[in-house]
Image (cartoon, helix red, strand yellow):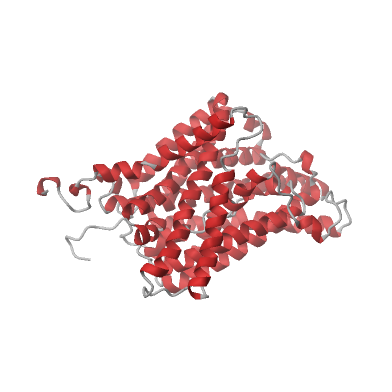
Amino acid sequence: MAENEPKSVFSGKKKYLGVFTLAMINVAAVLSIRNFPSMAIYGWSCIGWYIIGTIFFLIPISLAGAELATGWPEGGGVYAWVKQAFGEKDGFIALFCEWSNNLVWFPTVLSFIAATLAFGLTPELSQSPYYMFTVMMIAFWGTTAVAYFGEDASAKMSNFGVIVGSIIPAVLITLLGLWWFLSGKAIVLPQFSFSVLVPEINLGTLPFFSTVILLFAGMEMAGFHALEVRNPQEDFPRAIGISAVIIFLCSVAATLAIAFVIPAEKLNLASGVMQAIQYFFDSSGLSGLVGPMGILIAIGGVVSLAAWLIGPAKGLGVVAEEGNMPPMFDRTNKYGAPVAVLVTQALIGSAISLLYVFLPSVNQAYWILSAMTVELLCIVYFLVFAALIKLRYSQPDKPRAFKIPGGKVGVWLVGGLGLVGVSFSFLVGLMPPNYYSNTFGYIASVLLGTFVLAVPPVIFLKLKKPWWKKGVKKEEV
């Protein structure tokens, strides 16, 4: 790199990421033990729900991510892919929607981390808003601090944390469920038959469809790290394939294990994982291990937080470096971390967490905010699948180490399934909870909020100045 060449947000001394690390980044972003109880409620039919999510999202986004990441590995993830297909504005919108959805999502995963850690220490602690907020902030700012030290530090955290905090607990829950079954203990599920695998789809379960689809959101996270990979054309497809298999098998097996033990009507969605572990270990005379398991699962929550915290932030760093955001957002440190973006999102996320913990009256509004995260993610993935199809026509000769087989028919099948899945999720995501009497007001609030969180890229591009671009001085313009 020439001495006067602008320094990339990804530059700096660091090690290359391997296949295993890339796979763990995706597993950390997607595999969330806290989702298992909400799926376990559906018993045997959870398998059917997982299959629906796999067909309409996991397989399409895995294949799309592999093709797009190996064809356009220049960094920026979804921003780079959508920009190539539809231009700068749409790429910016896709990335910003992914980033802004995190701001509302952060408090939910932070509260899960704090509550699970409390279960591992003293369960009564979870009733204290001061404890909850303190642990949430330690986890949030601690993860941000790790991101400050660049890709190498984040990768080491991901490799260790996802194994210790996600894969090991999921495997242990599965093994305990298998032990429960083989030891002849009572299974609370009805007798198995292929008919019970079919999900019951009606107006009551339709909103759950969007939840199932987005259970696998995050498979594109490795794409944000394209410039840290020595051989992206070969490493990305392998990593995505490995992570997809791990995520599906761990999710199905651990969810069924929980469903074996706890009746649906007694399953607490907030503490269901620890509830299941308490059942398992009490029954086997190993109650003393409940606390350590709570700590491990809390670590898994921190790693999931880290994957979503770092990936989109790096993407925004690329956007700012190209001059599409004010110069303050392209500030990086000697490790190449986009510190301005990291600090900005940490401050906003902390403020939302403060309201979430200390003002219970905001919980009803938070349902609307949560629905907005669904809509924002649907926008992101709609643009990604559309870009996959468009680029097969606009740049057919662009080298892609991995190409979805079947030519244009294959890419339309994969992209089409993804488009159908996220479009349907967007629509059912607008359906209000049962206790909302004002359906129109709810839908209007969700759509308005989604628009507000998606429109800033348009405003930034309207206000764009030549001197915003990295390396261009204001007085030279």
Quadrant of the rendered image containing residue 389 = bottom left
Q: Who is closer to the viewer here, 262 or 82?
A: 82
Counting from the top left corner in percent of width and height, residue 213 is at 59, 52
Q: Residue furthest left?
A: 476
Q: Who is closer to the viewer here, 165 or 456?
A: 456
**From this viewpoint, is residue 18 visible?**
no
Q: How many marks?
A: 0
On screen, residue 374 above or below 156? above
**From this viewpoint, is residue 345 visible?**
yes
On screen, residue 380 above or below 116? below
Counting from the top left corner in percent of width and height, residue 42 is at 74, 48
Quadrant, the N terminus: bottom left
Identify which residue is drawn at 66% across, 39% down: 270
On screen, residue 338 above or below 357? below
Q: Who is closer to the viewer here, 244 or 203?
A: 203
Identify which residue is drawn at 24% across, 42% down: 463
Counting from the top left corner in percent of width and height, residue 31 is at 59, 54
Counting from the top left corner in percent of width and height, residue 8 is at 28, 58
Left or right for 418, reference 194: left
Identify which residue is drawn at 80% across, 48% down: 261
Left or right for 464, reference 226: left
Identify which residue is drawn at 89% across, 56% down: 184
Left or right for 193, reference 45: right
